[in-house]
Amino acid sequence: MLKNNKANDIEVSVDNLSFLDVFIVQKYLDDIEIAKKAFGVTNESQQLFENINKLKKSLLLNRSNFKSIKYNRKTVGFIQIHYENINQVKIGIVIGEKKYWGKNIGSIALKKTIDLLFKNDNNLTTITLDTASYNVIAKKCFEKVGFKVYKEENGKVYMFLSRDSYEKGNIK
């Protein structure tokens, strides 16, 4: 149960995306409010719908690039992991169950994913992500786990977390 309206470390897990999870996650992307936050846009556009369709296909074809976020064993969101190069990973996170927004689930899932990535890949030096400037909840979540802003432009905030910062324990 959510104590003090916040989830705890034991209640949240990050797992490999199952075949069933693919359909749950695709349903989240059918919600235009969630999709706009996921892609960091404020308006519906043809480009948004194309991006949604690409992501839905990728979920099916490249399931290993995604992790499901579970709260008390129920899928509530997902994390996408994309290697930009041998040293850098870009991640994206979506909590698809709106009733769990702002409940610390994203922060816990990010910490677990960061641990997994840095512990399992010695070549990895940097994890990056971005969010819409208006998505204050997401930005606070990312800063909470140690990400720093390196650029803001065109309505987006770009952030990074270095291995050095991670190893120095700068993740809260």
Image (tube, grey):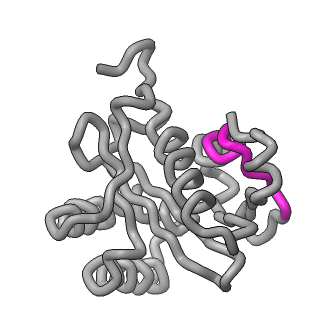
- Outermost residue, left side: 20
Residue 157 place in picture, x, y as percent: 73, 60
Which quadrant is the C terminus positioned in?
A: top right
In the image, residue 19 above or below residue 131: below
* Left-right relation of 157 to 101: right
Q: Which residues are magenta?
A: 140-150
| Magenta stretch encompasses residue 85 | no
Which quadrant is the N terminus positioned in?
A: top left
Q: In this orientation, which residue lies closer to the viewer: 123 or 99?
A: 123
Please give the name of the residue rendered at 41% of the width and 64% of the height, measured from the top-left corner: 35
Q: Quadrant of residue 8?
A: top left
Q: Is residue 41 visible?
A: no
| Magenta stretch encompasses residue 147 | yes
Please give the name of the residue rendered at 73% of the width and 49% of the height, measured from the top-left corner: 166
Residue 150 place in picture, x, y as percent: 84, 62
Please give the name of the residue rendered at 75% of the width and 39% of the height, measured from the top-left corner: 169
Q: In this orientation, which residue lies closer to the viewer: 123 or 134?
A: 123
Q: Is residue 95 visible?
A: yes
* Left-right relation of 6 to 73: right
Residue 127 place in picture, x, y as percent: 68, 64
